[in-house]
């Protein structure tokens, strides 16, 4: 049995490292088949030499996050472990210190993965960004945070959020209420992000003034959107004609972020996704960037990542059988 010791200068860092009921270190122990014991300011790791060396790299990565003020969670412990397993823990430094926005409750919002960091930087540096990836990767939430940040900095005068009202097996006509009440359920995720960033009271105030608009994609037709940060969500459910219509709404001093998951297309049979086509035909245009997020960037419950992986494997097998 091989043993090595790491010294942690501050007791609160050791508490953060181990987590509630030692949950963080249990993940490290399970992953590498080692034992991790806290003895005051010393952390002892024992096991097979190679496993101990890898576990120490993972713990070093976690301590680097803690030193930058991060509070560890299951999600970022698993993410550091995945980076270490791929030999990329050196990239952790690139994630540090990038606060996008302060939420209404005073919480600093930061990218949680390298993919999210790339996505945020793309939004900063380009006029149009396409963010493509599975559920739970923060595509919409980070875009809303960047929009609020630009609005607070007076870089834009309006935030416009939109999505196509495409039904996943339901029909709008059967829903109760007027048109706004019918489409509100489709726009709810956009409201949720804005409530988090601004608070419900500020959101309502800005909406009444016309600084914030949340509307179905059909409402964008015939408009030119100047001085605006525009987000098109669930863009995999746009037709090619709708996507062209949306892209040509871009006005002066505006940004567009287009998000979608091309594995969850709800368009009727025979209709092709405008998002897939846009990603292909716009890829060589300056000031437009496409960022692909993966299951590694999922920041929801661990099972969401496992579900995305399982579906990807199933689709790969199905495609292999077709070939």
Image (cartoon, rainbow, N blue to C red):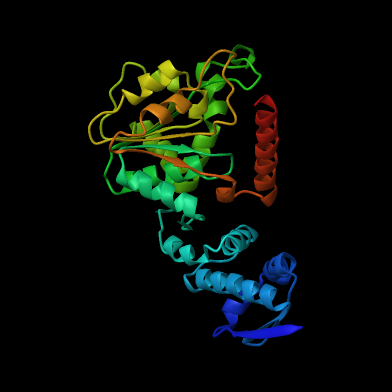
The picture places residue 29, in percent across and down from the top left corner, at 72, 70
Observer able to see residue 220: no
- Horizontal and vertical percent position of residue 217: 44, 22
Task: Name the quarter where the C terminus is drawn.
Answer: top right
**Near-viewer residue (175 or 24):** 24
Viewer-closest of 155 and 3? 3
Is residue 259 toward the left or the right of residue 75 in the image? left
- Can see residue 135? yes
Establish if 258 lies above or below 171.
below
Q: Where residue 55 sits in the image (x, y, percent)? A: 65, 72
In the foreground, 7 or 2 = 2
Left-right relation of 34 to 160: right
Residue 162 picture quarter: top left
Q: Is residue 22 above or below residue 316?
A: below
In-image side of 310 versus 267 (left or right): right
Spot occupied by residue 297 in the image (x, y as percentages of width and height) = 55, 49
Residue under the image location 37 percent in, 50 percent down: 121
Residue at 67% of width from left, 74% of height from top? 50
Q: Quadrant of residue 218?
A: top left
Quadrant that contains the N terminus: bottom right
């Amino acid at each position: 049995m091989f043993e090595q010791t790491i010294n942690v200068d501050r007791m609160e860092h050791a508490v953060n490292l181990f987590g509630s009921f030692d949950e963080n270190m249990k993940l490290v122990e399970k992953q590498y088949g080692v034992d991790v014991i806290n003895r005051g300011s010393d952390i002892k790791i024992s096991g097979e030499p190679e496993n101990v060396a890898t576990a120490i790299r993972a713990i070093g990565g976690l301590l680097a996050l803690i030193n930058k003020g991060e509070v560890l969670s299951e999600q970022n412990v698993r993410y550091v472990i995945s980076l270490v397993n791929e030999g990329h823990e050196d990239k952790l430094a690139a994630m540090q210190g990038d606060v996008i926005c302060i939420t209404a409750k005073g919480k600093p919002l930061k990218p949680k993965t390298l993919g999210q960091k790339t996505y945020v930087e793309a939004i900063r540096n380009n006029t149009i960004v396409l963010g493509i990836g599975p559920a739970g990767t923060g595509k919409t939430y980070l875009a809303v945070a960047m929009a609020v940040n630009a609005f607070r900095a007076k870089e834009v005068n309006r935030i416009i959020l939109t999505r196509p009202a495409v039904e996943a097996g339901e029909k709008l006509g059967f829903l109760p209420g007027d048109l706004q009440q019918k489409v509100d359920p489709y726009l709810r995720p956009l409201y949720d992000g804005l409530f988090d960033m601004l608070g419900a009271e500020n959101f309502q105030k800005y909406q009444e003034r016309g600084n914030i608009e949340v509307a179905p994609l059909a409402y964008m037709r015939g408009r030119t959107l100047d001085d605006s940060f525009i987000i098109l969500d669930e863009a995999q459910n746009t037709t090619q004609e709708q996507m062209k219509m949306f892209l040509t709404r871009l006005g002066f001093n505006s940004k567009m972020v287009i998000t979608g998951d091309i594995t969850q297309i709800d368009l009727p049979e025979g209709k092709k996704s405008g998002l897939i086509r846009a990603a292909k035909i716009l890829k060589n245009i300056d000031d437009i960037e496409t960022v692909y997020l993966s299951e590694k960037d999922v920041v929801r419950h661990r099972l969401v990542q496992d579900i995305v992986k399982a579906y990807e494997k199933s689709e790969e097998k199905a495609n292999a059988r077709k070939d």
